Amino acid sequence: MDYSWLLTAAFLVFLMQAGFLCLESGKIRSKNSINVAAKNITDFIISTIMFWLFGFALMFGDSYYGLWGTSHFLFGENHSAYQVSFFIFQLMFCGTAATLMSGAVAERMTFRGYLWVTAILSGLIYPLTGHWAWSGAYNQDNPGWLQHMGFIDFAGSTVVHSVGGAVALAAIMIIGPRIGRFDSRSQLPVGNNLPMSVLGTLLIWLGWFGFNGGSTLVFTDQVPVIILNTCLAAVWGGVTSSLVHYYFHRFADVTFILNGVLAGLVAITANCHAVSPAQSAVIGMVAGVILYAGTALLEKCKLDDALGVIPTHLFAGIWGTLAVALFGDLTILDTGLTRMQQLSVQLIGIVAINLCSFALGYMLLKLVNYFVALRVSAENEMLGMNISEHRASTELIDLLGSMHKQQQDGSFIESVPVEPFTEVGQIAQQYNQVIERVKTEISQRDDAISSFKASEQRKSAILNSAMDSIVSIDLTGCILEFNPSAEKMFGYLKHQVEGLNFIDLFVQQSEQQNIRDSLSHKFSASQGLLRNRRNSIHLCRSSGDIFPAEITITGAELGGELKNEFTFHVRDVTRQQKLQDKLKSMAYSDPLTGLYNRTYLIDRLNRIIRQPEGSNTLLAVFFMDLDRFKKINDTLGHNAGDDLLREVASRLSRVTRQSDVIARWGGDEFVILIEQGVTVDFVQNKAQEILTVMREPVELQGREISIPTSIGIALSEVDKTQAGQLVQQADIAMYHAKQNGRDNYQLFKQEMANQSAREFNFEQEMRQALLTDQQISVVYQPKVDHDRHIVGLEALVRWTHPTEGVISPAEFIPLAEQSNLIISIGEKVIQLVLAQMQHWQQQQIAPIPISINLSGKQLISDTLLPFIREALDRYQITGSRLEFEITEGVLVTDIEHCIRAMDELQGLGIKISIDDFGTGYSSLNYLKRLPIDVLKIDRSFVDECASIVEDGQICATIISLANNLELEVVAEGVETIQQLNFLTEKGCTVFQGFYFYKPMPAEDIEPLLAN
């Protein structure tokens, strides 16, 4: 029967009415409880009548241009069993929407107002907006305009819940807050019976399974997953909202737990059929956050929502409907839209439905309020709506009246009436006992206090520590007291164990004698259990199960006999131990790859090293770094990078043994620890095996990518090393593998560490050198024409170390490039050159252009142009007297950025020279675009240009190319007359090299310039 599931689901949804009744009854004040009950059942009655008369017709009847229905009024006479089942199911939905709205305006709206609002919502607003989105559910050839666009709201996050929330928002804006709601001097009670509200929430939760599961209309394979998704979203909504509240307020508010569950249910309702369980959890979490933020927003705006209907149903409903497009499986949605298109349609539907619901609700309720007051008077609100609206009283009001009459009459002879089987009746009964006690003799009071003292001292620990299992024993170990928590923990009732020996019953046999010894010493001996300490022990349940426990023992001396009694505070720590084990596992593993992490590796290394002395076993540590991993991340995205790291972990697991430890050190670095069968040959073969498997291509996002890897290996005997030192040595060896061209391995040697230390020291000393005027200097090498006239100078940096003398630029410039000191060095050189040019200018020495080498990092830095402008202005030097030499290899890194920087330099009148021309890879492709003035032929071609045909042809080609492009060409490294003659014959006009001049200090250059 196709309609059996619909009827079952409808009955479950009907349970939600009971749930809302319990929820609302528990959260409002008891003086309004009868009113809540009356309005809840009346809401359902009115909504049923309105939906049967014409609501269903407006919602599912033959569509008038997708706007409203025009058939099926007075539904049910000539319809099939399935159609009637469908009507009943939708009827329950209508009742839910009506009930939602009424909860927001509780404790202040008149009963007539409830009836009007329910009639408007269920008879007009809900059917009208529902037709737009759901009309095709009854007849697929009869879709509403939103459904036709592809709008999806599976079970009504917006159609049911946001509609109810929007009308509720309009209602509370019209009727205003409850008296005292936003008075900072007082605070309204959170409710009269929160356990009842919890029960209501659970009933709503149960009904929601029918709410969402039934929206499939027939029982399909989707239903179990829908119910699972519904449950997960509710759980995570409740957890998240309560945690957020706890974070800001430092206590757990039951209201936020309940509303968080409901917000999760509302949010998942629109999309539960098209998302995964994990996505459902995320949707629920976001709903919990939205609930908290929405509640805070209403507080800030001073809008009084008695039950949190608006953040729970309106705001969470909007989020759930958006989540359809954000998380939903497009194949399941089957709208034919892309994700962005679906998101647009969802937004249109949310705005249209909520705007219509709020606007219609506000206008119609304003109209009703004009003729029929929607809000009770202030006097009736204070009195309570049970009496003001229904002329009904409660047991509490009757009790207070009787007590007030006794107070006025001054007569306490007669007892107040007792209503049995109620909490108020218990209060009345207790009050009567107090009155009766007043009439008793003083002597009886003294006897009662005496007996009470002995009992109170014995039981005080149990009464004050109800969360723990509390057991009192005497000096022989016999049980005196056994609280309810102890009954649950050990599986015995109090009367079953009273008088029996605690040690015999609950302590493992292997530990019993030790505990008896502790007891005989009154738990004050140095061994066993101790008083006033947390003692760890394993205890037994009645079933024989053993569990870890924590016992705190306190003692007391009672009576004239100084009888010794001890109280055990017992706590089951099974969960804590499991949590500790889980946290330990999490602390030692890498969440992305599943490998061990750095913490575990170091801990493992330390444990191996701390083995008994005399162990001379070899250890091997492989330190691996993926070459150019950052480029993959930047190009294909971090998800691809994560996939690559997982693939690396898989491959390393394939080529290592069970006994080897593989750890992800961090980023794209991995470390392998090998402690068994380590020899030099073994680690070399293993390294080659790893390189081979890593070179195999991996497919990422449709591309085949290789994973070249640099490996550093450190070997040491176990008793001759430290964990940090061994890893550091492997890291140093890996660095040398990168320096040797990458995609290779290197075994650590001491000279590597020495070199690394030297480079580190140089880097620090270079920083200090830049702060002085003595160590960094500039020498100049002249450029000449064929007649040996000096036509320019090249400035070359020199570093005179205070202890090691002159350091070769070939040694310190690469270090500066790696540490970004190259920019500071470049700025220092520019300042020294400009200062020297200013000095020569003041000495009236003929001005001559000077070229300065510019690093690639400095060229593309944001500080270069401002620095050059400021320096030229400070030293009063024109840009036309400067030339910057840029190595050709720099241009292939970021050609567009380089071109922009070079254009701006030329704008200052500065010439641009390409140094080492002919050694790059793509210069000819970009040469016509580069804003350059000079080409410098690399000395590697000049050296043999007169003797080797190929080098001569390259030089001739570069000279011809420069002449054709009207560029100046300079040959560097000229050392023989043969080279000079050859280059001159080919058309070169400017030369530089030892054949003419070596680099020399400024004071040696001055005479040459003066001549």
Image (spheres, rainbow, N blue to C red):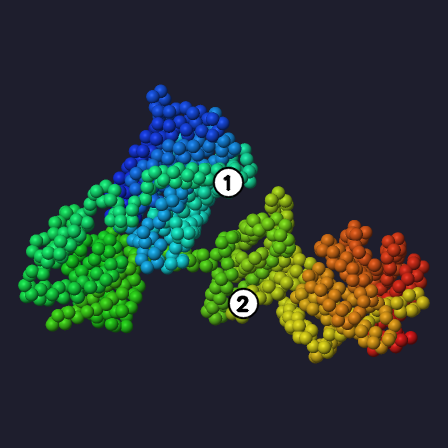
Q: Position of residue 241 (x, y in %)?
A: 40, 51
Q: Of label 2 and label 1, which has the lower sequence position?
A: 1
For the residues labelled 2 and 1, the Cα–Cα distance comes to 56 Å
In the rendered structure, the answer to whether residue 88 lies left or right of residue 68 reads left
Q: Which residue is disc 1 drawn over?
A: 347
Visible residue check, residue 330: yes
Q: Position of residue 314 (x, y in %)?
A: 42, 43
Visible residue check, residue 979: no
Q: Residue at x 18, y 47 (%)?
A: 395
Q: Position of residue 390 (x, y in %)?
A: 23, 41
Q: Which mark is residue 100?
A: none
Q: Residue at x 56, y 65 (%)?
A: 727
Q: Which residue is disc 2 drawn over?
A: 724
In the rendered structure, the answer to whether residue 28 lies left or right of residue 881 reads left
Kind of residue at badge 1:
Leu
- Circle 2: element type: helix
Q: Position of residue 836 (x, y in %)?
A: 80, 74
Which one is in front, 321 or 221?
321
Which one is in front, 262 or 685?
262
Q: Residue at x 48, y 71 (%)?
A: 613
Which one is in front, 57 or 725?
57
Q: Quadrant of residue 209?
A: top left
Q: Residue at x 41, y 53 (%)?
A: 300
Q: Quarter holding the N terminus?
A: top left
Kind of residue at badge 2:
Gly
The residue furthest top is 78
Q: Quadrant of residue 750?
A: bottom right
Which one is in front, 60 or 631?
60
Q: Quarter holding the C terminus?
A: bottom right
Please say if 88 is above or below 517: above
Q: Quadrant of residue 485?
A: bottom left
